[in-house]
Amino acid sequence: MIFDFMRRFRPRSEAASSQAFIARCACCGGTEFESRSVLWPELIKEWGLSRTEAAYIDRQQGTACRGCHSSLRSIALATAVMRYFDGRGTFETWVCSPAAGRLAVLELNGAGNLTSFLRRLPGHVERSYPEVDMLAMPFADGSFDLVVHSDTLEHVPDPVRGLAECRRVLRSGGACCFTVPVIVGRTSRSRAGLPPSFHGAPRANMDDYRVETEYGADAWSHVIKAGFGECRIVAAEYPSACAFTAVR
Ligand SMILES: [Zn+2]
């Protein structure tokens, strides 16, 4: 079913790419995936997505492991974390390892499907935005080894300041691993001055889900502007499953 879907929507340039589709879930090791459509016509129109762009965002958000239900977005984030900390095995086994058990981890806003795994870490702290203000977090400088958030930054009014806050609460040598939906063929734009657009359930229009920034290929620049010295782009699958690692 997935392969039928990709045959229909895979752009020519992608077909020529050597990047393989995800065959194995980084979270649980599962090899079966299921897909559903999650975008809706109004959002596609507001976002100005082409058919190809809508297809890969749909895949990022709507394709998930049958075993642990992690979306490609969560799998990308887990891959970024594992690579940064040189983790072995699956994310599920890594969170139970002594090395992971020594990490102080801040999870903002429920990072996709990773929460159930991250809760197994003794040093896991979970906070939700906007209840906790990402622009002024109630944590001392250098409190964490890892900050994770997933598809949150595009809803923050000042995303560079939000990332700078993540940097502030990280120890030197720590990292902020995160995802935002990225349209790779364009540059980022602020939605300031544009009609409001919302993610989440169609027509729910909850303020928490209001989109402030539509991210493009220059998404990495927000990481550097926030003061991080390095931004890694981690691809579990391109362009449907990419994550960023901002290195403190
Ligand atoms: Zn899985």
Image (cartoon, helix red, strand yellow):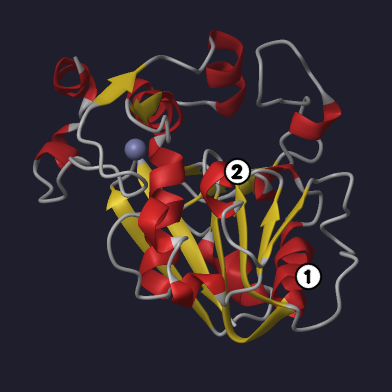
Q: Position of residue 84 (x, y in %)?
A: 42, 73
The structure residue drawn at horizontal position 36% and vertical position 45%, both measured from the top left corner, is: 241
Image position of 50 with respect to 97: above or below:
above
How crowded pointer 1 is (Cα within 10 Å; few <14, some 14-19, many 20+) is rated as many
Split into quadrants, the picture shows ligand 1 in the one at top left
Q: Position of residue 166 (x, y in %)?
A: 72, 69
Q: Is residue 57 left or right of residue 7?
A: right
From the image, tell me which residue sits under label 1: 165
The structure residue drawn at horizontal position 46% and vertical position 30%, both measured from the top left corner, is: 61
Image position of 9 with respect to 215: above or below:
above
Q: Amino acid at mark 1?
A: Glu
Q: Which mark is residue 81?
A: none
Q: Give the quadrant of residue 177.
A: bottom right
Q: Earlier in the sequence, mark 1 or mark 2?
A: 2
From the image, tell me which residue sits under label 2: 151
User: What whole-number distance in Å separates the C-alpha atoms at marks 1 and 2?
Assistant: 17 Å
Tell me if label 1 and label 2 are in contact, CB under 8 Å: no
The structure residue drawn at horizontal position 32% and vertical position 25%, both measured from the top left corner, is: 66
